[in-house]
Each structure stands twice: as structure tokens, then as C-alpha cells.
Image (cartoon, rainbow, N blue to C red):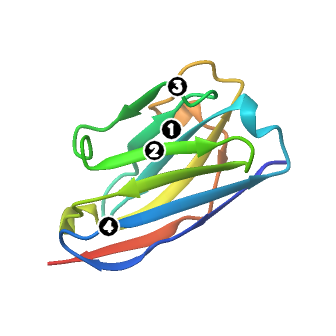
Amino acid sequence: QVQLVESGGGLVQAGGSLRLSCAASGGTFMLYAMGWFRQAPGKEREFVAGISRSGISTIYADSVKDRFTISRDNAKNAVYLQMNSLKPEDTAVYYCAAAPGLVRVGVQEYDYYYWGQGTQVTVSS
């Protein structure tokens, strides 16, 4: 059973930065494609960024492209989301997700099997 634990959320002013971390345990991390999703109040959960098992390939939602960076450290069983130039519309609960055996970058919720509990990011204007 894979467990994912997010951290690093908080309250930040517009234009600021945050770095989210997701620590994985209970599986072979290097075999999982990883992704970040978010869910704002009253909205559906949406894809934010994804990274391949090796870390070579990444995909971003248009709304975060050029502002957010996803990365991973397979030696530390961790994936990160560096968020810069934050906007109030980035306010959401951010979820880390793992896709066992996926050989490409996953962009859909159904690509992912394991999910973290989420971390709140609030951007004030």
C-alpha cells in the first residue's frame, strides 16, 4: 500500500511563492508516474502538473505553465511542486497522486491510483 503525504501549503500573498512536497512510502517510487491536482471550493478537481517516472518528461496545465515547476527525487521518494507568481485563483487544496506502472505522464484523474490527503494553499490578493 502506497502512502502519500503532502506538505508545504499555507497562506501567501499574490505574487509570492510556495513549494509543495509529497513524500511517498510503501512502494517502489521510481516505478510511479506522479502528478499534482487541485480542487478549489465549489469546483471539480483539476490537473496541475505531471512528471514521468524518470523525471525527464513533464506536462503542465495551461493555467500554471511558466509559473509552476514539478520535479522529483527518486532517491528521496519525493515529488515537489514549486509555485511562483501565485495568484488568488491558485487557491485550492492541492493533492499529490501516484500512477503505478504508467510509462507516460498522466493528465487525467483516472491515470492515478494513489492519492494524498491534500494540503491547503491560499493566495490573498
- Identified at 46% across, 72% down, the residue is 9
Residue furthest left as drawn: 125
Give the spatial CA distance, label 2 vs label 3. 11 Å
CA neighbours of label 4 inside 10 A, class few (<14), some (14 to 19), many (20+): some
Q: Are marks 3 and 1 in contact (CB under 8 Å)?
A: no
Q: Position of residue 74 (x, y in %)?
A: 70, 40
Give the spatial CA distance, label 4 vs label 3. 24 Å
**Looking at the rendered structure, which numbered label has been put on residue 70?**
2
Instruction: Please state, as top left, top right, bottom left or bottom right, where the C terminus lies in the image.
Output: bottom left
Give the spatial CA distance, label 4 vs label 2. 14 Å
Residue type, numbered disc 2: Ile
- Identified at 45% across, 60% down, the residue is 94
Where is mark 4, residue-wise?
17
**Number of numbered callouts drawn:** 4
Where is mark 1, residue-wise?
109
Nearest the viewer among 97 and 71 is 71
Q: Position of residue 56 (x, y in %)?
A: 52, 25
Where is mark 3, residue-wise?
56
Residue type, numbered disc 3: Ile
Q: First in sequence: mark 4 or mark 1?
A: 4
Q: First in sequence: mark 4 or mark 3?
A: 4
Q: Is residue 50 above or below residue 102?
A: below
Give the spatial CA distance, label 3 vs label 1. 21 Å
Q: Position of residue 20 (x, y in %)?
A: 49, 62
- Identified at 27% across, 62% down, the residue is 90
Nearest the viewer among 42 and 33 is 33
CA neighbours of label 2 inside 10 A, class few (<14), some (14 to 19), many (20+): many
CA neighbours of label 3 inside 10 A, class few (<14), some (14 to 19), many (20+): few
Q: First in sequence: mark 2 or mark 3?
A: 3
